[in-house]
Image: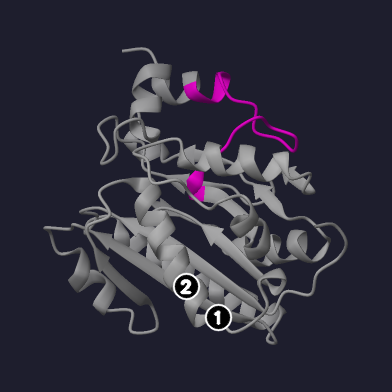
């Protein structure tokens, strides 16, 4: 699974669990990233899939405002199962060989930078099979003391030691060989990364395309980023 790969398809997968308030910001940012990629690499096809996982709010109405976004409605019941479901549907629509498809994962409460997909594509076509990006909490959600504590406890640089499902990229053949996202409430991103690394795939931890995610301390998924923030920061 080494060597350079010409990527023909990029699939973006976004699980959502009652995220009608933050989902618009996420989709606007992804839309901007798709436009940036289209300008830089018009040969690459891009598909965006949102998994509405048992949503009881207006998330479906939000996604309906983006007709180019594919929607999967289900009762996955966990972040891992929702990501897995979204990837399965996204890959089913991509006709290319798995070695030519790049999966970009983010979350419905997150905002990606404009160059997010351009950066992921560059890494993918350099021969990497796995990319681990950085994520930072939205400064509007945390008081200055908590925000300073978070930055003090995290090394945000190339070679960092973090794994975030809100900023993760993996080539589709690597994803399949690693068993995909396991259907678990949390840690599905770490499990996929460990399995991919065990295959000997080339990978990189990068700070080139930071994603901003919600800084709330009570999240949708047990053991997710919100619980991580609550445990890591002073009360």
Check disc 1 and report the residue beneath it. 94
Check disc 2 and report the residue beneath it. 90
Residue 53 is situated, as x and y percent measured from the top left of the image, at 25, 57
Residue 55 is situated, as x and y percent measured from the top left of the image, at 17, 58
Is residue 108 in view? no
Is residue 200 in view? yes
- 178 sits left or right of 57 in the view: right
Q: Nearer the viewer, residue 205 or 194?
A: 194
Q: Nearer the viewer, residue 55 or 2?
A: 2
Badge 2, how many Cα within 10 Å: few under 14, some, many 20+?
many
In which quadrant of the rendered view does residue 187 lie? top left
Residue 114 is situated, as x and y percent measured from the top left of the image, at 57, 64
> Does the stretch in magenta take in 93?
no
Quarter of the picture containing the C terminus is top left
Color theme of the render? one colour
Badge 1, how many Cα within 10 Å: few under 14, some, many 20+?
some
Q: Residue at x 47, y 72 (%)?
A: 90
Q: Residue at x 35, y 30 (%)?
A: 223
Distance (Cα) linking label 1 and label 2 = 7 Å
Query: Which span of residues is magenta-colored?
Result: 150-166
Residue 1 is situated, as x and y percent measured from the top left of the image, at 80, 57
Secondary-structure class at tag 1: loop
Q: For the view shown, which residue lies furthest in the left direction?
A: 56
From the image, give the main secondary structure of the stretch colored magenta. loop
> Does the stretch in magenta take in 151?
yes
In which quadrant of the rendered view does residue 120 lie? bottom right
């Amino acid at each position: 699974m080494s060597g350079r790969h010409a990527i023909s398809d990029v699939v973006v997968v976004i699980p959502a669990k009652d995220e009608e308030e933050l989902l618009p910001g996420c989709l606007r940012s992804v839309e901007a990233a798709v436009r940036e990629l289209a300008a830089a690499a018009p040969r690459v096809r891009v598909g965006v899939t949102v998994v509405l996982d048992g949503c009881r709010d207006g998330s479906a109405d939000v996604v309906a405002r983006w007709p180019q976004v594919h929607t999967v409605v289900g009762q996955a019941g966990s972040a891992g199962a929702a990501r897995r479901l979204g990837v399965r549907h996204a890959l089913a629509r991509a006709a290319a060989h798995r070695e030519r498809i790049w999966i970009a994962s983010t979350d419905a409460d997150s905002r990606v930078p404009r160059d997010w997909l351009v950066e992921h594509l560059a890494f993918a076509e350099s021969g990497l099979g796995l990319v681990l990006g950085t994520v930072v909490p939205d400064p509007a959600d945390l008081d200055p003391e908590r925000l300073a504590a978070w930055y003090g406890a995290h090394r945000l640089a190339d070679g960092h030691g973090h794994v975030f499902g809100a900023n993760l990229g993996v080539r589709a053949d690597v994803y399949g060989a690693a068993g995909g996202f396991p259907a678990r409430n949390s840690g599905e991103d770490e499990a996929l990364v460990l399995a991919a690394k065990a295959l000997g795939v080339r990978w990189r931890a990068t700070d080139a395309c930071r994603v901003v995610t919600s800084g709330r301390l009570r999240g949708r998924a047990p053991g997710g980023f919100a619980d991580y923030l609550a445990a890591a920061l002073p009360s």
